[in-house]
Image (cartoon, helix red, strand yellow):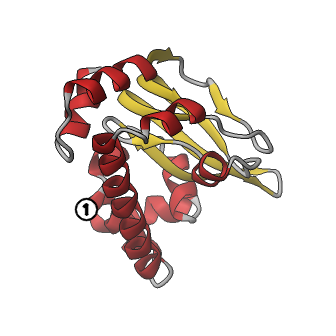
Amino acid sequence: MNKLTDTIRNIASLDDTTESAILAKFKVEELKKGQLLLKESRICNKLWFIISGTIRQYMIIDGVEVTKWFYIDNQWATSHYSYFEQEPAFDYLEVYEDSVVCSITYDDEKELLNYLPYSKYHVVLLRHYLASLNYFMRNYKQMTAADKYRFFLENYPEVLHRIKLKDLASLIGISQETLSRVRAKLQ
């Protein structure tokens, strides 16, 4: 739980009352590889802070799993639309490798948002995610397959070393064969 409070403390000063509330609301969970945390059409009722491990977010499009993102150590994972809007999810969350997480339910986090330090942290985190998403979307559509691979290699090397090539190909929207050619040219 120290990783969680340290991460929050890096952005917002935690008073004793807020820290106690965080420790009371978050639960440590050990998750097993392959475990589904969320299925399409279910409402996501949890937010996970990853202490160690990887969670994959994917959708099923025309019967094929299409990887949308990987969340790793010291990152937050959830189905954003489903969690924040409390509407049915259009995606899946799967434990990609054995993981240890701190989780909180939607209702518990709503209560925690009444504590100013946590609320401040939450706003800063959301602003960061929105800015990163905007930057990513602006550039991603214009990238070639090689550009996409290079982008992930430069910006998310810690993810690339932990995932299968077929899942990386799915994530960047190219075939595994194209990914192999791109990797060979860049090495």
Examine the image and state in which quarter residue 14 appears: top left
The answer to which of 12 and 78 lies nearer the viewer is: 12
Local packing at callout 1 (Cα closer than 10 Å; few below 14, some 14-19, many 20+) is: few
Name the side, left or right, on which 169 lies relative to 160.
right
The answer to which of 176 and 64 lies nearer the viewer is: 64
Residue at 58 percent across and 56 percent down: it is: 170
Q: Is residue 117 visible?
A: yes
Name the side, left or right, on which 152 lies relative to 140.
left
Residue farthest bottom in this picture: 142
Examine the image and state in which quarter residue 22 appears: top left
* 117 to 172, vertically: above or below: above
Residue under label 1, please give it: 154
The answer to which of 74 and 25 lies nearer the viewer is: 25
The quadrant of the image that shows the C terminus is bottom left
Residue at 42 percent across and 66 percent down: it is: 130
Residue at 67 percent across and 49 percent down: it is: 82
